Amino acid sequence: MTPTLGFWEGTIESLDAISQWRELERSSSDLVLIAKNVADITKAHETGRVAVLLGFQNTNLFEDRIAFVELFADLGVRVVQLTYNNQNELGGSCYEESDSGLSRFGREVVREMNQTGILIDLSHVGDRTTLDVVRFSDRPVVITHANAASIFPHKRNKSDAVLKALKENGGVIGCATYRNITPEDACATVQGWCEMVARTVEIAGIDHVAIGTDEGHNTTQADLNWMRKGRWTRGVQYGAGSEARPGKVAKPEWLSSPGDLGVVRDGLAAVGFSAEEVQKITSGNWLRVYGAVFG
Amino acid sequence: MTPTLGFWEGTIESLDAISQWRELERSSSDLVLIAKNVADITKAHETGRVAVLLGFQNTNLFEDRIAFVELFADLGVRVVQLTYNNQNELGGSCYEESDSGLSRFGREVVREMNQTGILIDLSHVGDRTTLDVVRFSDRPVVITHANAASIFPHKRNKSDAVLKALKENGGVIGCATYRNITPEDACATVQGWCEMVARTVEIAGIDHVAIGTDEGHNTTQADLNWMRKGRWTRGVQYGAGSEARPGKVAKPEWLSSPGDLGVVRDGLAAVGFSAEEVQKITSGNWLRVYGAVFG
């Protein structure tokens, strides 16, 4: 799993978050392993532990310093999203009216993440910047938590053009279960969700679709406020929600916790995927990209 | 005068810079007065001191916190440029290939600067973002150091569309003497420079043109590197310069120090400006905008 260690947090706050995960790993070493590479993930799996990839949903941790990319890579950070809900120094976001595309600093950071083995996440990134990065990156990139916009139109979801470029790049999209960006019938039953996955595979190809979820654990209204408003606004912000649905949304009944994810394996088989294809969607595609990026 | 207290500096470094200027004011109280409003500027003038407006060429001092705008206003900051050479959370820059326009956070900051009495500087801001701000701001905005691009084409200089919008807004452009963005004949003689000012007045109007300069004092190559590269790149950056002219450029001979600026008064009269017009260009236009913004 890839927990989010930061949305708006700067360098010091991000180091605090890394320290907290190290402390959790220390105090629960029978349950948690912070993974740096595929070998670590395999080891965690074989010893009955959860492999954790340290991830950030924004680049504020770098505080505009190109050299900090390598430092955070050395500290075990493996996934970083280039922009969160707002434009930043690197590029545009899905919620801005206009997307500049990848900036000059953005190009520097993409190159540096490629070289230091940090996986580039484009989930909340604007469509134009996303396309720029998918084409500019030397390594596969990912959309860890989103759906196809042609299946469920939403600013957070990705155009077919992006998904086709992702296929060329060798990357992966992790399909979401988050109710605000997922069709109602996919939330209602695991079969509905697996049918959505099948439609996504038709767009992006069997080697480029995986599980993303985008679910929180014990998320509070204060957490939501932080994600949506950070410290940047005094106004009301709904994030992926809306005035009609401003608050926390229910998880799909078939996925009340990560422990339920096993049902997806049967669900995918039931909608027609072969055993090999199920394996790709549930783990193989992620592992291929991790291997290509983490080395 | 409006010294630059920061280019890439974050909150703490910006507070350090403010502290240094306070220390200078304390140790040289016979020479320097940090001005908060027009009354302070008048007082400095009457007592033979230099009025200093604390200015920043970037918004990194706020570190994405809307509430910090008011805090820095309270600490005496009076001029802040929205973006420096790179795109940031607020908008686009003159050196980016593509300019997003004013972002969501950018709109929040413009509103907050309007309310807290910080003057918005758009000198290095991209053309699209500049136009957005000139139209969106409730108060006059300024271009403290640039020239008209129709007179000297350069990414740092401003289109006629911007200068005409500035006129509507009630703002001011401070014409530059910096050799990389100023015509050679304007650098060669004070008459040439005053003729350039006259052409700028034809575009923006007599109430919207003033003196900007954009000159440094004892600027070193290390200073230039900081301005151009900050901590964001390991590559070569020429800023307003070029591969053919990468380093420090000479000041105009007629302006070897700020003490020489008096020659502009006669120069403007010599190219046909009336006494009243000379007064507007050399001080009146700035003071009008300062009054409208600082309150």
Image: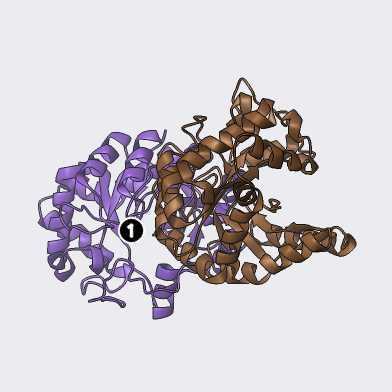
Chain colours: A brown, B purple
x 63%, y 45%: residue: A211
Query: Residue A277 versus residue A143: which sits nearer the camera?
Result: A277
Which of the 4 image quadrants contains residue B233? Answer: bottom left
Query: Residue B38 versus residue A168: which sits nearer the camera?
Result: A168
Image quarter (top left, top right, bottom left or bottom right) of the C terminus of chain A: bottom right
* Left or right: A39, with B284 as reference point: right
x 63%, y 62%: residue: A78
Secondary element at tag 1: loop
The amino acid type, in three-letter code, at marker 1 is Tyr
Q: Is residue A46 above or below residue B91?
A: below
Which of the 4 image quadrants contains residue A59? Answer: bottom right
Q: Is residue A295 visible?
A: yes
* Left or right: B125, with A288 as reference point: left
Q: Is residue B5 above or below residue B72?
A: below
Spot occupied by residue B87 in the image (x, y as percentages of width and height): 42, 54
Spot occupied by residue B237 in the image (x, y as percentages of width and height): 36, 71
x 63%, y 29%: residue: A192
Q: Chain of mark 1?
A: B
* Left or right: A32, with B184 as reference point: right
Q: Is residue A19 visible?
A: no
Q: Is residue A129 above or below residue B237?
A: above
* Left or right: B157, with A175 as reference point: left
Query: Residue B179 versus residue A286: which sits nearer the camera?
Result: A286
Residue position marked by numbered label 1 in the rendering: B95
Spot occupied by residue B110 in the image (x, y as percentages of width and height): 47, 40
How crowded pointer 1 is (Cα within 10 Å; few <14, some 14-19, many 20+) is rated as many
